[in-house]
Image (tube, coloured by chain):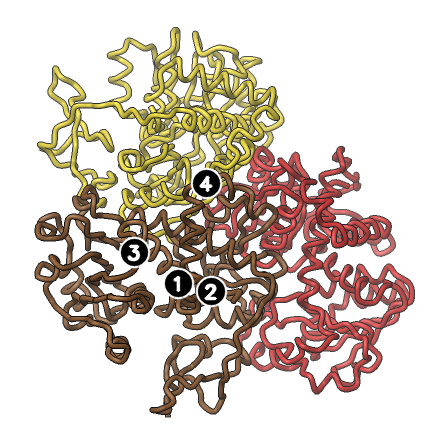
Chain colours: A yellow, B red, C brown
Amino acid sequence: MMNLIDTMDLSLTEIDGLVETALDIIKNPEKYAESCKGKKLATLFFEPSTRTRLSFEAAMYELGGNVLGFSEASSSSTAKGESVSDTVKVVSCYADIIAMRHPKEGAPLVAAKKADVPIINAGDGGHYHPTQTLADLLTIYRRIGTFENLTIGFCGDLKYGRTVHSLVNAMSRYKGIKFVFISPEELRVPRHLREDLDISGISYEEVTSLENAMPELDILYMTRIQRERFSDEDQYQRLKDSYILTVDKLHNAKEDMAILHPLPRVNEISVAVDDDKRACYFEQALNGKYMRMALILKLLGEKDKTEEKIETVSDFVCRNKRCITSCEQEIKHEFRLADKAKNIYRCIYCDKEPKK
Amino acid sequence: MMNLIDTMDLSLTEIDGLVETALDIIKNPEKYAESCKGKKLATLFFEPSTRTRLSFEAAMYELGGNVLGFSEASSSSTAKGESVSDTVKVVSCYADIIAMRHPKEGAPLVAAKKADVPIINAGDGGHYHPTQTLADLLTIYRRIGTFENLTIGFCGDLKYGRTVHSLVNAMSRYKGIKFVFISPEELRVPRHLREDLDISGISYEEVTSLENAMPELDILYMTRIQRERFSDEDQYQRLKDSYILTVDKLHNAKEDMAILHPLPRVNEISVAVDDDKRACYFEQALNGKYMRMALILKLLGEKDKTEEKIETVSDFVCRNKRCITSCEQEIKHEFRLADKAKNIYRCIYCDKEPKK
Amino acid sequence: MMNLIDTMDLSLTEIDGLVETALDIIKNPEKYAESCKGKKLATLFFEPSTRTRLSFEAAMYELGGNVLGFSEASSSSTAKGESVSDTVKVVSCYADIIAMRHPKEGAPLVAAKKADVPIINAGDGGHYHPTQTLADLLTIYRRIGTFENLTIGFCGDLKYGRTVHSLVNAMSRYKGIKFVFISPEELRVPRHLREDLDISGISYEEVTSLENAMPELDILYMTRIQRERFSDEDQYQRLKDSYILTVDKLHNAKEDMAILHPLPRVNEISVAVDDDKRACYFEQALNGKYMRMALILKLLGEKDKTEEKIETVSDFVCRNKRCITSCEQEIKHEFRLADKAKNIYRCIYCDKEPKK
């Protein structure tokens, strides 16, 4: 492994290793102050995401390295029609490691196949955002002390919220996990995710009331209802305020419940909640920096680019307009056999099934 | 003090200290070359201002530190509806000190109340711009050798020019100062500023002719007539060229008068004046860098965030649309008693009186 | 010489020196890792060019220096009406060397006349782009081992492609060079360039078929047909695919021919060609970084700003709308005698003849 495209690329042992490194960085920052001296991180943000970009930059600086890059596509060669492959091929000449954010699903995987340096997915459309999940995991570990035997509530936009899907997948690998999905009907967690949980025999329930769910939660993961995920403005306006966390609603929560939020928040958590000791969304941002430091160290430390060979077929065409295959030049469409019994293939870039 | 929101937050002793540090930096730059090693400055520019941003960045690099941030709001989480409070709370995780520019008045004060690190106001709308004033002060000191017994002319847009108001306030604290305000009727210095001078018994006159005023001036502070301050394009076109400084107009000026300008200039000073030894607006830019270095050192050196406690009331609502209270979520409107005799209250963020 | 405006400002000896330094950097990078410690490069990009900007930034970081600047004009004071002269005068206070990209021809020359620090032209409209040419030269030298006795094909947009014109001029100074210009009729190399070659007695031919020209080429320089150079969208659509290099077309090329391209490419070279060992356009990007490192070292190493005095006259007015004289305030129009016999004068900024 020399790239990070999805959290699920990491084994539990690797995640433990990252957590351990992060904890050591927190304890002994001076030990790491020159770890990346003379190294350069490129932050290629084809769409803006200040928080994530600044977190990566702070991480690299605290390791003694330097940073270059761009913060939106209008400043990049993409505006001139350059492919993602070419961009990262060239940036490989300028940087030792690349953090890439891109509106198209699978773009970082395309990059990983071409670049001569490690690629970190810093978010690809509504698809993956693994370093956010790493931040979430460190926050859970630092607050609760374990990844096992936890009841985790997710509240808000569970349909489009990629951070939710990603953390559900990541936590599903631990013992004794129960999920409580709290959302309006329109924003329920996607069927495929529920099916995966069913198959794995993981306990979960779906409810609509935040307050009823509250007492049993060890972790409450709040999410923003993002305007950009709605095609219908009315529906957005009607739903956006539905699941707001206020001080009142916390009255029956556990004393040591941890409140997480990937940020930015708009108004889904009242500012008054910030002073509650259960609130840990700002800690979460700090933890994101430490996990990114640990990740950069790990990826730069691994010498060989040993790409995992997956068998793929190219008998289909991916029709997902949000997939990088929809715009990258001369890209081979590739599919992996996702479910042998049902003969289901999925695009290796966006995980969608090909249209027949 | 651990923030700089307005120049008037600084005592005369503190200003003397900054000037002294700046002079020492100029003399012994190598002494400071690693003063901020391992430290990070965040430049949060919610509206663009290249000159100010680059000056801060150069300052931090010359102190051996690093820089991260954004140069306009479109690249920031604000576009997603995040509050200033949340942004700085998160950026506190990534940086040791923050320089913030924001179109709304009072935004840096909001930031200062929330951030865990020092905040420097790098300009908040038409309100304050203290580091520009610090640059002006160092320039006066280096050119004239004193802050006392000076006749200071201000020319151009004295109504909207915040750098003018700020320098007038800063210089009003020294002995033997006389101001000459040179402007068209439409752009006279605001009444409240004249009233303040009257109350303090400080000498000033208002004139319309630059040439008549010239002979008595020790300092001539030119300002740009900014298009963005006018709602009426015609009025702008008619006035913008009114008060242009040319070589000719300098014929009766003192030999050692200092010509200042906050820059950027459009055409209010003829390029031919640049070669005159009295011109010191480019020196002023350089001095701005040194004062920012001194300021960063001072703020990072102060360990405790001892916030000055001002008594405030919340009985009113601020209706100023340019005030940060107009858009920040869940912000408490607070007012300080500005004039006990007249029972005048002012918003702590924008200094405007509440509408009754 | 303390600026680089055009490749032709460099003597052959100076180019040899830069190549030598670049080769030494490649061999012993650690020797240069702190060469520019404490120095700052300003990248002033008045129009975006990610590749060039990142290459300069990587170069400066690998020399141990720091970088500040902006990546598009909207973030700069230009939006407020500031002249290029003033911008660079101020940035001279913040940086030790400036790399400038500007949409107007001659802007870097204006900058060089005012700045107190070295200026590197990082592209001025369709005019010069000397560091690209330096990248091309190092690539040729590293691949072929010599600058002499070469047959060099240029393919694509030879009318507007400034990298072509620049490399033709640069290579014309070596012995035994032959050019083959491969383009559609509409995009032929400009007449003035052909006339210059005629006068210098340099061998060249113009052809329309890439395949016919292929066998004799030592170097094939492909170029992008840029949409922004066409006023007519139809013409662009008809021509853009005309001269695409595919694996097939390489069947009769020399074994050790070098394929160059200034990048970004859109589709003028098939991705399949990337795996051919003759392809060296990604190497070229890497070489660009090394030549920029060599150039920064050279310019910072030269103490005195000894400006070459050219005799100029100001009897004419430059009417070229793409020339910096069309917008810079109070700029003196200057012309040099380009051809004494024909009494031809050319603007020192854009090289165009004045309209009579």
Q: Which residue is tagged 3? A: C146
Asked if residue B315 shows in the view, the reply is no
Around disc 1, counting alpha carbons within 10 Å, would you say few (fewer than 14), some (14 to 19), or many (20 or more)? many
Kind of residue sitting beneath label 2: Leu
Q: Which residue is tagged 1? A: C130
| Sequence-first disc among 4 and 2 | 2
Q: CA distance from mark 1 to mark 2?
A: 7 Å
- Helix, strand or loop at label 2? It is loop
Give the residue drawn at x 40%, y 43%: A45
Observer-nearest of C335 and B37: C335
| Sequence-first disc among 3 and 1 | 1
Kind of residue sitting beneath label 3: Thr
Left or right for B140, reference A113: right
Kind of residue sitting beneath label 4: Asn
Q: Are marks 1 and 2 in contact (CB under 8 Å)?
A: yes
Q: CA distance from mark 2 to mark 3?
A: 23 Å
Left or right for B335, reference C65: right
Instruction: Name the image quarter holding residue A326.
Output: top left
Q: Which residue is tagged 4? A: C28
Instruction: Name the image quarter holding residue A101.
Output: top left
Asked if residue B221 shows in the view, the reply is yes
Give the residue drawn at x 47%, y 56%: C295
**Image location (x, y in percent) of residue B270:** 63, 79
**Image location (x, y in percent) of residue B39:** 63, 37
| Sequence-first disc among 1 and 2 | 2
| Sequence-first disc among 4 and 3 | 4
| Sequence-first disc among 1 and 4 | 4
